[in-house]
Amino acid sequence: MIPKAGRYLSFALAIVCVAAATILIPSRATTHEIPTDIVIQSILKPGPESIDLLVRVPLEAMRDVNFPQSGPGYLVISEAEETIRDAAVIWIGREVRLFENDVHLDEWEIVAARLSLPSDRSFESYELALESFDKPPLPDDTELFRDQALLDVLLRYPIVERTSDFFIDPEFARLGMRTTTVVHFLPTDGVERVFEFSGDPGLVRLDPRWYHAFFRFVGTGIEHILSGVDHLLFVICLLIPFRRIRPMIAIITSFTVAHSITLFASAFGLVPDVLWFPPLIETLIAASIVYMAFENIVGSHWQRRWVIAFGFGLVHGFGFSFALSETLQFAGRHLLTSLLAFNIGVEIGQLLTACHYRGRSSHELAHAQCVNGTHGNHHPVRDPRTQWLALDERQGQRTDGIQLSATRAGLCVPCRTHALGDACADYRKRGLDPVRRIPALPAPGGYGSFTIPQHGISCEKQKGLAP
């Protein structure tokens, strides 16, 4: 019995030793999760023969790279030089694309790479950041965890001319779940350009020409008005009661002039910089839509509608400025040009909406009036067949054929077709001679002629008269 109890005791002691070793001995190969929020700082400065790109990234974004550690997880910096360069190549050098005059700069080198403390402020300027790479690395007794360290990298790209047009495509989105990239560009004129964007912004012009900014913001204006549900809904509510193009243009232009005033004022900082102002504007925009919908129910006149559009346009201009605040960084030195282009794009988008709405509503209204018997001021069409026959009888055309006028009846294309068929069928029931051909007067969108054989009606298109 004693030997058997000894074996059980030895087995229990072995389990305890394995559990203690698992807890006390740190694991060297750990799986690193994707960080939630990552901020990448970068500085670009062209020189006579090359352009320098300085990048600072949190070390926790360098996944799948095992840095040497000791104790509870402190980095062994003296043994991490090769690992630091590998991480810089894999996660930074290969993720950035630079262009000079539309030519990809595919030759680059890592001049230096080092670890920094989270309290380091050297990236506040290009000079301080460049000097930090000449400093010795941090000592090994620095108690620095992996998730606290910062990775600084200096990349150099050979260029042809320092005054060239430079583009950057920073594809840093995979470094974290949400990434924010800040780019400081220092061109030759000495005016610093600062860009800040989330995820992968695509190709960014660091110093755009005026025509680049103009066409970019025209497209931005069109996209904003067509994709913004609140502004698009307001424009539709403005135009619902009107069918003629003149009042539509007057109302849209009034709205555009008004929101241009407040948009320019916001761009130059002439608006309240308080927390309650944006929610107030959003609330007023929603209220403007409700008001316009209510006014459409009770009735309105376009001579007064353009005044209302101007008043609410001032409010919507502030809403445009909130959406445009991040995009204006791509305007470069051409702020006024970009604002003008954005307003032109908004106007184009509104006119496209008006034209599309007018075309659809006119066709649907004409067909609804035919069906309901309210088409035309002088000829109510309760029965299209009766209307056609009445017109023909008054004209006395009962001997040789049926001369039917589409424009005189005022029917839309579908109703005109059915009325022709009903009229001809009714004539046959009366025992009249079948008519071989019934010419219809040309009308916009009308049919050219109708051939009537013994057993049916078929439509023939004439040149220039499509159904």
Image (tube, helix red, strand yellow):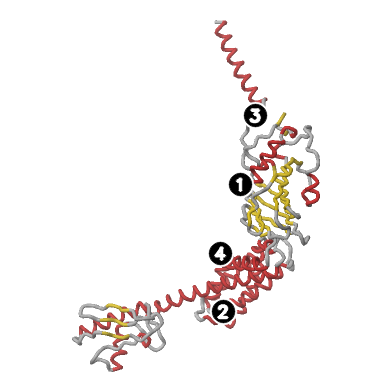
Using the image, tell me which numbered label, if any, was put on residue 174.
1
Q: Amino acid at mark 2?
A: Ile
Question: In the rendered image, is residue 437 in sight?
Answer: yes
- The answer to whether mark 2 and mark 1 are in CB contact below 8 A is no
At label 3, counting other C-alpha atoms closer than 10 Å, the crowd grade (few under 14, some 14-19, many 20 or more) is few
Q: Residue furthest left?
A: 431
Q: Which quadrant, please, contains the N terminus? A: top right
Using the image, tell me which numbered label, if any, was put on residue 27.
3
* Image location of residue 177, percent across then percent down: 61, 47
Instruction: Please say if 384 is above or below 262.
Output: below
Using the image, tell me which numbered label, if any, was put on residue 249.
2
Q: CA distance from mark 3 to mark 1?
A: 26 Å
Q: Amino acid at mark 4?
A: Ser
Q: Secondary structure at mark 1?
A: helix
Question: In the rendered image, is residue 293 in sight?
Answer: no
Q: Secondary structure at mark 2?
A: helix
Residue at image location 75% in from the left, 57% down from the top: 186
Which of the two discs, 2 and 3, labels the residue nearer the N terminus? 3
Using the image, tell me which numbered label, if any, was put on residue 227.
4
